[in-house]
Image (cartoon, helix red, strand yellow):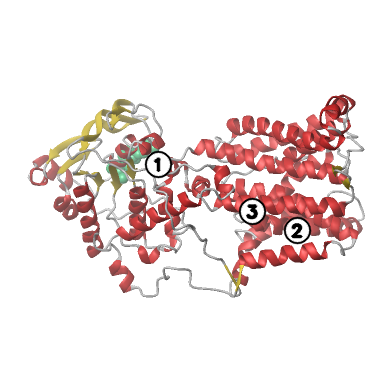
Amino acid sequence: MSAPLTSQTAQAKPAEPAATPARRGFVSTRALTLMAVALLAVSWGFLPDFTVVILSYIGLYSIVAAGLVMLTGVGGMTSFGQAAFVGIGAYATAWVGTSPVATQALGALVGTNGLPWVGLLLGLLITFVVAWFLGAVTVKLQGHYLPLCTIAWGLSLYYLFGNMEFLGGQTGITSVPAIKFGSLSLESPRAMGVVIWIVLLVALWLLHNLLDSREGRAIRSLKGGQIMAESMGIHTARHRVKLFVLAALLATLSGWLYAHMQRFVSPAPFNLNIGIEYLFMAVVGGAGHLWGAVLGATVITLLKEKLQDILPALLGTNGNFEVIVFGLLMVLVLQRFAEGLWPTLQRMASRWVYQPQAALPAAVKPLDQHALPPAGTVLLAAEHVTKRFGGLVANNDVSMTLKAGEVHALIGPNGAGKSTFFNMISGVDSATEGQVQLMGKTMGHAPSRAFAALGLGRTFQHVRLLGQRSVLENVALGAHQRAHKGWLASMLRMDRAEEAALLDEARQQIERCGLAAFAHVPAASLALGQQRIVEIARALAGQPAALLLDEPAAGLRHLEKQALADLLRQLRAQGLGILVVEHDMEFVMNLADRITVLEFGTVIAAGSPAEIQSNQRVLDAYLGGGDDNEESAA
Ligand code: ADP
Ligand code: MG
């Protein structure tokens, strides 16, 4: 065990947050949820018809909005087109339940009572295919292009519904059958409402479980940027498409329930307006929080109800004026409550309500172990790597190796091409010429996650953490590729043993790096120097053989730097190969076994610290105007 890296800081600032969340109310979120559900269940039979219908609609909208919370709030992808997927769910079951062709062919097979279930399957299947296709094509788009695309396909699907003869055109489909269980027919909204709310609550539970897992961390990491997530071994494109499909399937489920409650389907409820309203619900409620979806759906539904009465009377003419009010409301809410209403509600309630700590099994299933190659093995080799950005040559014919059991330092003035070289040898970017070999494999254009899988861990010059998540979660993300449970297992809580192992690994690395006191605080609340250490802990959680550190000592105090050096020596003794970019010459000279010096993208010297210190070209480069005391600007 090395000396704690941040003990100095922890002592100097006793007011730092404690290891566990300090504030504790007297009622748990779980108890509160159960009470609310019980209250709803008990009062359901006595509520007026109108209230039941409104509540049912809130349930339907919440299911769609919950998918959007996952997609937009958690995954960082905006969709205006969810209403179209609701439409697929509604039309699929309406068609199966009413068209003569379908009812005759399928009715014989599954009986009349089975038709809605066939409709559900068909809807989910169509959505799965459509969403997978649309997702694969569009979710890779950056910036404003994805929202624009969702508008485009939202509109196209809507017009498709209205123009298909067999779907009843603009008039739609009437007499959609009710769902029946034997002799029990769910004809009344009161009966359907129960199903809707059960579906909603189960969906929320599954999504909650998903977010609270290894895969949930991977989903959240999408917001932390593709480069970081891929470096942790996460296939970001696949996760984005899956998230997109998940949100679409939830919308379809809502559409299916809607069709059997309303018993009538027409194109109007699936147009772009409604797609935008769904997004309002998610954003106004609190796009990062599942219960925000329910809150948003409630607020928007009630408001719409009121506005549809008030506005025409006020303006003296009919029209969808509530959309304008929603637009203004959204601007207002986002101005005052950037994260939506739910976090504000949470803050207000935090004196009474607490989040129970998840209980994980003690018996721990071990994570994948990677054996370290013997000392002296070449882990990483760059051969004649050249990288051009237009006319600028950022790396010019750079060759170097990193061996197991050594610390190799890469130094050079600002702009010398060190970070670019890091990107070349970690799969973030690929070389214009030359090649990179990792563990004896030629990497070509392989993505960062392939580098991670082969045993490469790294930190970033500009810290890339999920600032709002705890240090523990950030570090656990680093161990992602050492475990295997997928989305379904996570949703069904079949991942608990593995999750315990992941968090245990994260805890050990946090302790090893001296950050134990900060395990449960948001990463962004740490000083920048400490955040760099969190990145090291995260890289170590992946059990790398080769470790790349881009300016790890920037922002650390003297004693913290010593502790960091101790940790790196200890890792070297264990057989890791460490490539470090660092501007602090004292740190480098005391630690490194070998040093390579870059200037204007070219290697101007390589050798032991003593050789480098007496090399005239190096001295010239450093005295010739290079800035070797750069503080991180990140
Ligand atoms: P260092 O890390 O040694 O300070 P960098 O590798 O960040 O240097 O940059 C090397 C040179 O390449 C700089 O001149 C920089 O402006 C340029 N550069 C880096 N990344 C890019 C990019 N994506 N596009 C264009 N130029 C770049
Ligand atoms: Mg740099």
Does 616 appear above or below 328?
A: above
The residue tagged 2 is 298
Image quarter for ligand 2: top left
Which mark is in front, 2 or 3?
A: 3
Is there CB contact under 8 Å for labels 2 and 1? no
Q: Residues within 10 Å of mark 2 (few under 14, many from 20)?
A: many
Amino acid type of the residue that numbered disc 3 sits on in the rendered structure = Trp
Q: Secondary structure at mark 3?
A: helix
Residue 109 appearing in the image = yes
Q: Residues within 10 Å of mark 3 (few under 14, many from 20)?
A: some
Seen from the viewer's position, the closer of residues 384 and 565 is: 565
The residue tagged 1 is 231
Q: Secondary structure at mark 1?
A: helix
Separation of marks 2 and 3 at Cα, in angstroms: 19 Å
Separation of marks 2 and 1 at Cα, in angstroms: 40 Å
Does 486 appear above or below 356?
A: above
**Residue 613 pos. (x, y %):** 10, 47
Q: Which mark is residue 205?
A: 3
372 horizontally vs 127: left or right: left
Is there CB contact under 8 Å for labels 2 and 3? no
Seen from the viewer's position, the closer of residues 58 and 117 is: 117
Q: Quadrant of residue 34?
A: bottom right
Q: Quadrant of residue 432?
A: top left
Q: Earlier in the sequence, mark 3 or mark 1?
A: 3
**Residue 329 pos. (x, y %):** 72, 58
Q: Residue at x 91, y 34 (%)?
A: 171
Q: Earlier in the sequence, mark 2 or mark 1?
A: 1
**Residue 464 pos. (x, y %):** 41, 50
**Residue 125 pos. (x, y %):** 70, 32
Is there CB contact under 8 Å for labels 3 and 1? no
Q: Residue at x 40, y 71 (%)?
A: 16
Residue 584 appearing in the image = no
